[in-house]
Image (tube, grey):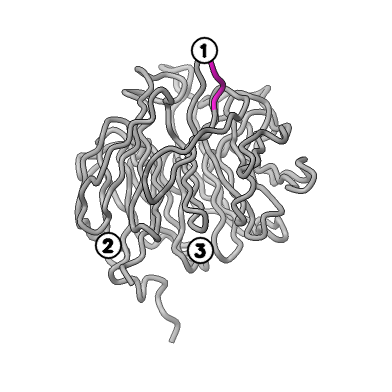
Amino acid sequence: MQQSPRTGRDGDVLAVVSQSGPTVSFFDAASDRHVGTVEVLAEPHELCFDPTQRLLWCTTAYRSGYYHANGGRRTELTVIDPDSHRVVEVIDLAPEHGPHGLALDTAHRRLYVSVEGSADRPGGVVVIDTETRRPLGRIDTHAPGPHWFAIDPAGRTGYATNKEAPFVSVVDLEQGTLTAKVEVPGSEGLAVSADGTRVYVAGPYAAFSATAEEAPATGIRVIDARTASVVDILPTENTILPVHLTSTGKLLAGELRMESDPVSQLGRHAPGRLTVFSADTHKRLGELEVGCAPLTITSSPDGRIAYVACVASSTVNIVDLETLQELARIDIAKLDEPGAHGLAYIPRPA
């Protein structure tokens, strides 16, 4: 008898950010039952779980609004105990501001946080010691708004996508310097292959428009890490924001779909799409309709289940990646917590 993909997840938890809540909510990974909520500072965005310290990190990017229409940048990170559902510490990164992307290197006890630029410095990445929870320095990315950040498995190279700059920044994490700029016409989410040889980058930058006729072709740019150049494009019908690579080698992309709206030039959100590729062969494996405006994707450690957070519908789609069928949908809005965004899968304590 084939086991359900939800079997054996008792005690595991899914953490979900409500960007406008502002909260982080916790759900039982086997039953989807709501088990707790933590209030955080306004405009939380992304989450990162550190299994070594057993702490959950949360970025708070703005005082209100979003990337290109905000009411001022925040400077804080919130550290949460995911088991007791309490805030452990709020870390102020000032004068750094607009923290968003998170990448963890457990071997070297480092957390990398992307931050936006200002009049006197470009955007960059703040390096944090995960044991002391204190900043160690910053790496310039030579772009105003590095938004997402990822590192290779060895912890030697980092990649920052830049919404408006026409390149992906490549940085040497050991030397703390920029080493290359890979030409991409504005970029969103990204993921690095398990062997560190390829980087998958969503492009171009999401303009949130139903009529983007002159924009570059949408899809996932495949970067060869050895040559720091784009070697392939996996085409998609719509603009992509999140990109995620599972432990089983499936490449997941969240497509943003917009419809014309006579009231707004930007259009209105239509149901989004989860598109699945093979990271090895680049073959398109299938697709599934999800909520409106998918912003974050994660997966279970065994790679069997995907979680897709959709900010406009404030829902999380739970998908069986073997059958590409929806298993359930968590409605964050029913908790009076609008704007589902960051996700983290938290295995039960050993």
What whole-number distance in Å separates the C-alpha atoms at marks 1 and 3? 45 Å
Residue at disc 2, secondary structure = strand
Seen in the picture, residue 279 relative to 304 is either above or below; the reply is: above
Give percent across and percent down for residue 298: 46, 53
Prevailing secondary structure class for the magenta stretch in the rendered image: loop
Q: Which residues are magenta?
A: 119-123
Q: Secondary structure at mark 3?
A: loop
Q: Amino acid at mark 2?
A: Asp
Residue 38 shown in magenta: no
Q: Which mark is residue 281?
A: none
Of residues 310 and 167, the one drawn nearer to the viewer in this rendering? 167
Label at residue 28: 2
Label 1, residues with CA under 10 Å away: few <14, some 14-19, many ≥20: few
Judged by depth in the image, the label closer to the viewer, 2 or 1, is: 1
Mark 2 or mark 1: name the one nearer the start of the chain: 2
The residue labelled by disc 3 is 321
Q: Earlier in the sequence, mark 1 or mark 3?
A: 1
The location of residue 6, given as percent across then percent down, is 37, 70
Q: Say left or right for 96 vs 190.
A: left
Residue that carries the numbered disc 1 in the rendered image: 119
* Residue 149 higher or lower than 266, as above or below: below
Mark 3 vs mark 2, CA separation in Å: 19 Å
